Amino acid sequence: MKPMEFFYTVEPKKISVSKEDFYKFIDEYPRKLTYDCTGISDPPAISYNDFELANRWPYSVVANTWVYSDNPNDYFYSENPRYYIMENYKEVFDSKTGNKIED
């Protein structure tokens, strides 16, 4: 796996936000995001990826959370759901190196 600096030189700053702020970030993000949900964790992990930023995961992730339920009787219910966004995505994007990994 290539290091982060292969794709961009500014260190991403992930911050915890509310559910509302998370979805506002997703809705207002300036480029197309690709949604991914993987069952490698319990609850399953969700990421929103900007493949113009980097053409490989995890360097493409600009927001992430997990599958949560609002129903207290559900298996994936959480009283403290976590939502994270890349606070400095503009600076990170501006520091892109232009490098890509070939398929």
Image (cartoon, rainbow, N blue to C red):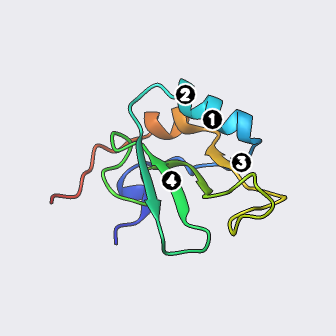
Picture quadrant of residue 102: bottom left
Q: Residue at x 71, y 64 (%)?
A: 74
Q: Residues within 10 Å of mark 2 (few under 14, many from 20)?
A: few
Q: Which residue occupies the foreground of this view, 46 or 98?
A: 46
Picture layout, residue 99 above or below residue 72: above
Whichever of callouts 3 and 1 sits on the residue coming sooner in the sequence is 3
Q: Which residue occupies the foreground of this view, 46 or 54?
A: 46
Q: Nearer the viewer, mark 3 or mark 1?
A: 1
Picture layout, residue 35 above or below residue 58: above
Q: Which mark is residue 47?
A: 4
Picture quadrant of residue 41: bottom right
Whichever of callouts 4 and 3 sits on the residue coming sooner in the sequence is 3
- Which residue in the structure is indicated by mark 3? 15
How far apart are the two marked residues, 2 and 1, measured between alpha carbons? 6 Å
Q: Residue at x 63, y 44 (%)?
A: 85
- Which residue in the structure is indicated by mark 1? 23
Whichever of callouts 3 and 2 sits on the residue coming sooner in the sequence is 3
Q: Residues within 10 Å of mark 4 (few under 14, many from 20)?
A: many
How many marks overall? 4
- Which residue in the structure is indicated by mark 2? 27
Q: Is residue 53 left or right of residue 63?
A: left
Q: Which residue occupies the foreground of this view, 33 or 96?
A: 33
Inspect the image, locate mark 4, and give the three-letter code of the amino acid beneath it: Ser
- Residue 93: x and y in percent read 45, 37
Q: Which residue occupies the foreground of this view, 3 or 44?
A: 44
* Label 3 secondary element: strand
* Label 2 secondary element: helix
Quarter occupied by the N terminus:
bottom left
Quarter occupied by the C terminus:
bottom left
Q: Residue at x 50, y 53 (%)?
A: 47
Whichever of callouts 1 and 4 sits on the residue coming sooner in the sequence is 1
Do the residues bearing badges 2 and 1 touch, measured as CB atoms within 8 Å? yes
